């Protein structure tokens, strides 16, 4: 069974030192982007093409991210892949 890939912000820590945002890429092509401080989650689908990642939220505009090893850059955020 495939597992989700989870990325957390590198530079965005909240006052408690927790990661302020996480992105979960599920094996079924769904993603969940959670902004911890706001208690808000954006859901959508994603497509991966090599080092490019296209995120399509259920409501809103699509975003293009770039994968470089364990780092994902999307919309000005740097996210680091968490180890399972």
Image (spheres, rainbow, N blue to C red):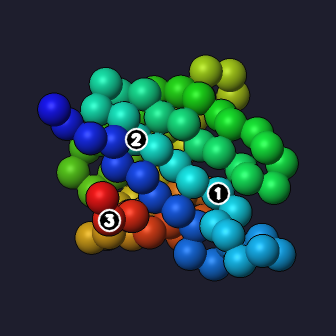
Q: Which residue is mark 2?
A: 25
Left or right of 64 in this view: 50:
left
Asked whether residue 73 is in view, the answer is no
Quadrant location of residue 3?
A: top left
Query: CB of mark 3 within 8 Å of CB of mark 1?
Result: no
Kind of element beneath mark 2: strand
Q: Residues within 10 Å of mark 2 (few under 14, many from 20)?
A: many
Residue 23 versus residue 17: which sits nearer the camera?
17
The percent position of residue 10, horizontal first and vertical second, equals 56, 75
The percent position of residue 67, horizontal first and vertical second, equals 34, 61
The percent position of residue 46, horizontal first and vertical second, equals 41, 33
Image mark for residue 83: 3
In the image, residue 80 above or below residue 49: below
How far apart are the two marked residues, 1 and 2, measured between alpha carbons? 13 Å
How far apart are the two marked residues, 3 and 2, measured between alpha carbons? 14 Å
Q: Which residue is mark 1?
A: 21
Left or right of 35 in this view: 72:
left
In the image, residue 20 above or below residue 31: below
Residue sticking out furthest to the left: 1
Q: Residues within 10 Å of mark 1 (few under 14, many from 20)?
A: many
């Amino acid at each position: 069974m495939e597992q989700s890939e989870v990325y957390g912000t590198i530079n965005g820590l909240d006052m408690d030192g927790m990661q302020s945002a996480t992105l979960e890429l599920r094996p079924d092509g769904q993603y969940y982007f959670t902004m911890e401080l706001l208690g808000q989650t954006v859901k959508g689908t994603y497509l991966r093409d090599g080092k490019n990642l296209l995120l399509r939220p259920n409501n809103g505009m699509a975003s293009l991210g770039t994968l470089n090893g364990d780092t994902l850059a999307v919309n000005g955020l740097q996210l680091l892949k968490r180890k399972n």
